[in-house]
Image (cartoon, rainbow, N blue to C red):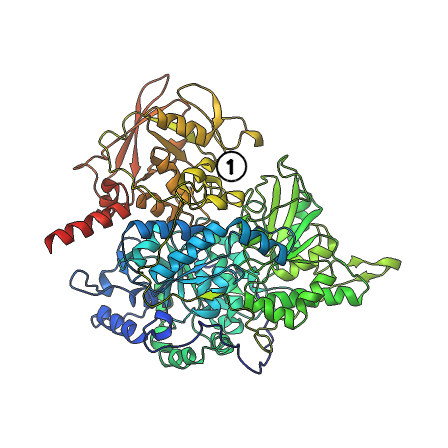
């Protein structure tokens, strides 16, 4: 085991609350749906059956995953036979959640499966499509008009198939889940990579692609390779400017964006008891940035306080009864962590991470030096507080405290344009009632809608020339800062940090500022030294705000779901064709991607969100921000490729369509951790739709690799990563050992490369298919296989 000794700190000041939130039509308890889908009795029975008398202590991750195993005649499990990294777990999640930008495609897939109703509690959340520009009221009006067709589709499909629908303005998916559904000990999967946010409530949350979600929604087993477990031991107590955001920023710096693949980050130790529930959610949320499967905290008093404050006292009562058996790791289980990292909260510094990657970690004491040694723009063009990572009441109140300090010192306005997004309608209403948002507005802040906004690229930015790729720097409390992430501008240098540091930077206006040591100059030669804000874990009273939830009727099978055939926003799916022999013979190489290639590079967001439910239209963005190894290193060449048939250079999707029109099959070669970032399955659907057959990379991110498999693409990795360097422009690629009778689990594939000049050469490729997944490849997709299986069963009845 490796041990690292970094840091983190400060006790959150508990604020007594007088009464709980008023009902919003959802956060209520029903015995017919125990704990919002969670069933403690069943979980404990599963664990007892799994142990088979074993006395080995279990980690918290193992308890939560293994208690959701499907136990029946087809699957029986024994603890000692589960091998991390190899055993494929067959699981039944308690809940499924989708946001509007992924729900459209997930629902289209569900519709094509011809099922009457979801088999697992499911919700859809309208948070990604709202474009931020002028402020909450005007932006919401624009969204309702611009996306009316999509919202109507999501609303009607949700009604028909028994799905809860959170309307625009409800809030960000993970915040709404945390307020209404997150239950200690549960398992939720969501079509967003930041679903681990639920770990702040002791619920295991895992991000998946839409096809995985459809599996669970249809009652099928959901598969997951048994993960390794990284234990992070927290000691000490935070103080000063340090916040929980710095824990995950520090951890990202330790582990990098890919070291979490196939691993769950499990926090333990006395430091966990010093953190508030939403603060722990911040850490779990951003754990997606290290590629981890999930992130989890043990049940604590802070979770109980939050549950009580959000009208879920019944959950607290039941959770206390299973705390030791289910909601905490067994004593001695730390011996079974695959790695242990130690973080001393008392010595952890505030961090600022970036640009262009969330694992480029800078302790605040080192940031000024890093800025001086780089060509990053020093002046900040925007400061932003919000996102699903940091938009809680506590986050907004910390921001307000610094605004009040500046105002009292005579500094009335931010120096840098300041945007703020409440995490939910409930948080907005509470912050409004407590005067927080008004104080921020008076200081010059633009209060955006309770939605994702710039964090996911839904930002109609006018202060810089985005088209001309104007160089600038922004700082935010967001979780992700990839190239072009916020505004589609590859020259925007994005840095992520805590809300309080973002606010301090907004007054300084410069990236080389250190609020711990540096003052803000005032008129008359005076100076303002900001004092760190004090965390207020909970408000005096949560205000519910507007009721934005659409409950699914008990029986709505007769209701229509209408999709206009002429729509450019919605398109019913046509099943992909089944595997064709020789599909991998003499493939053309569409593009050799160099360097970081996230799902944002493969399928950019921003203005493309409007086409998320129209596969053909959104495919026009495929790889349009990726770097092609064969073209000049010029921003204008991003997303371009040379057509192997004409030698002309065009944007990648145009080349792909030309090859497809001429019956030419093609493949992609990728670099390390190909497809990291969000869970968007469009990054897998688009190459499949445009005639792609395989993606060969040095390594893959977990969700993207699964998405490729689910949609009939063939993801393969170089046995020798150096073979990537041997691939040249114009190479024709043949894969040997992929046909029926040849392709088997743990059996390598051979790549045969035929260069334009020089001898043919071969190398070994690996894959991660298990026997059941090979059926997906042969059927053309996982959904095709499910439908074929259902049809076969019906014929035998």
Q: Is residue 693 left or right of residue 484?
A: left
Which residue has dot 1 on it? 625
Residue at 37% from the left image edge and 34% from the top image edge: 690
What quarter of the picture does the C terminus occupy? bottom left
Q: Is residue 376 visible?
A: no
> Callout 1: 10 Å neighbours few (<14), some, many (20+)?
many
Q: Say which of 157 and 303 sits in front.
A: 157
Q: Is residue 109 visible?
A: yes
Q: Position of residue 34 (x, y in %)?
A: 34, 75
Residue at 55% from the left image edge and 66% from the top image edge: 425
Q: Is residue 780 above or below residue 178?
A: above
Q: Position of residue 25 (x, y in %)?
A: 46, 72
- The outermost residue toward the left is 796
As helix, strand or loop, the secondary structure at mark 1 comes to loop
Q: Is residue 769 left or right of residue 95?
A: left
Q: Is residue 759 above or below residue 502?
A: above
What quarter of the picture does the N terminus occupy? bottom left
Figure label count: 1
């Amino acid at each position: 085991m490796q041990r690292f000794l970094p840091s983190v700190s400060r006790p959150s000041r508990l604020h007594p609350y007088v009464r709980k939130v008023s009902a919003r039509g959802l956060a209520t308890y029903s015995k017919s749906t125990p704990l919002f889908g969670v069933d403690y009795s069943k979980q404990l029975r599963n664990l007892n059956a799994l142990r088979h008398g074993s006395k080995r202590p279990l980690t918290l991750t193992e308890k939560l995953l293994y208690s959701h195993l499907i136990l029946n005649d087809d699957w029986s499990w024994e603890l000692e036979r589960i091998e991390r990294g190899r055993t494929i777990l067959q699981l039944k999640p308690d809940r499924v959640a989708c946001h509007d930008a992924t729900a459209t495609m997930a629902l289209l897939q569900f519709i094509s499966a011809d099922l009457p109703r979801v088999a697992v509690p499911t919700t859809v959340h309208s948070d990604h499509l709202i474009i931020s520009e002028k402020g909450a009221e005007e932006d919401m009006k624009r969204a309702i008009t611009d996306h009316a067709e999509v919202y109507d589709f999501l609303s009607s499909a949700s009604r028909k198939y028994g799905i809860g629908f959170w309307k625009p303005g409800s809030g960000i998916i993970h915040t709404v889940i945390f307020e209404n559904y997150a239950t200690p000990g549960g398992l939720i999967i969501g079509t967003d990579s930041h679903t681990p946010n639920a770990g702040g409530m002791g619920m295991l949350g895992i991000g998946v692609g839409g096809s995985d979600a459809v599996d669970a929604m249809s009652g099928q087993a959901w598969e997951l390779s048994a993960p390794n477990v990284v234990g992070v031991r927290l000691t000490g107590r935070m103080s000063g400017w340090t916040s929980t955001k710095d824990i995950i920023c520090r951890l990202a710096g330790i582990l990098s964006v890919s070291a979490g693949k196939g691993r769950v980050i499990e926090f333990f130790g006395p430091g966990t008891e010093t953190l508030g529930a939403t603060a722990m959610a911040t850490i779990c949320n951003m754990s997606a940035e290290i590629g981890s499967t999930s992130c989890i905290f043990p049940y604590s008093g802070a979770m109980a306080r939050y549950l009580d404050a959000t009208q879920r006292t019944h959950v607290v009562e039941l959770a206390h009864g299973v705390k030791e058996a289910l909601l905490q790791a067994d004593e001695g289980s730390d011996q079974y962590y695959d790695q242990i990292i130690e973080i001393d909260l008392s010595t952890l510094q505030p961090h600022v991470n970036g640009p262009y990657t969330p694992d480029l970690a800078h302790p605040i004491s080192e940031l000024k030096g890093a800025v001086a040694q780089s060509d990053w723009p020093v002046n900040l063009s925007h400061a932003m507080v919000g996102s699903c990572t940091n938009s809680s009441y506590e986050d907004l109140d910390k921001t307000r405290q610094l605004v009040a300090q500046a105002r009292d010192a005579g500094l009335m306005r931010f120096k840098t344009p300041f945007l703020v997004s409440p995490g939910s309608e409930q948080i907005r209403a509470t912050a409004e009632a407590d005067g927080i948002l008004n104080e921020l507005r008076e200081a010059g802040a633009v209060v955006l809608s309770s939605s994702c906004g710039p964090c996911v690229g839904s930002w109609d930015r006018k202060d810089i020339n985005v088209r001309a790729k104007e160089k600038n720097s922004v700082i935010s409390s967001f979780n992700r800062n990839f190239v072009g992430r916020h505004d589609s501008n590859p020259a925007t240098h994005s840095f992520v940090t805590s809300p309080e540091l973002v606010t301090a930077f907004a007054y300084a206006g410069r990236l080389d500022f250190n609020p711990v040591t540096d003052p803000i100059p005032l008129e008359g030669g005076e100076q303002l030294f900001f004092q760190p804000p004090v965390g207020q874990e909970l408000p005096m009273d949560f205000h519910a705000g507007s009721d934005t939830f659409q409950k699914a009727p008990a029986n709505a099978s007769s209701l229509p779901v209408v999709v206009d055939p002429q729509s450019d926003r919605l398109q019913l799916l046509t099943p992909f064709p089944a595997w064709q022999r020789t599909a991998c013979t003499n493939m053309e190489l569409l593009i050799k991607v160099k360097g970081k290639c996230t799902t944002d590079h493969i399928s950019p967001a921003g203005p493309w969100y409007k086409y998320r439910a129209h596969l053909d239209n959104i495919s026009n963005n495929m790889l349009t921000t990726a770097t092609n190894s064969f073209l000049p290193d010029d921003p204008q060449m991003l997303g371009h490729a040379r057509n192997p048939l004409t030698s002309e250079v065009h944007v990648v999707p145009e080349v792909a369509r030309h090859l497809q029109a001429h019956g030419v099959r093609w493949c992609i070669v990728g670099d390390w951790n190909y497809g990291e970032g969000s869970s968007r399955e469009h990054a897998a659907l688009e190459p499949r739709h445009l005639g792609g057959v395989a993606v060969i990379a040095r390594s893959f991110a977990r969700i993207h690799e699964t998405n490729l498999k689910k949609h009939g693409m063939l993801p393969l990795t170089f046995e020798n990563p150096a073979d990537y360097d041997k691939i040249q422009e114009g190479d024709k690629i043949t894969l040997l050992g992929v046909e029926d009778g040849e392709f088997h689990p743990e059996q390598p594939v051979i790549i045969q490369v035929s260069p334009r000049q020089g001898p043919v050469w071969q190398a070994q490729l690996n894959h991660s298919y298990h026997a059941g997944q090979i059926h997906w490849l042969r059927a053309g997709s996982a959904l095709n296989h499910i439908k074929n299986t259902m049809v076969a069963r019906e014929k035998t009845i």
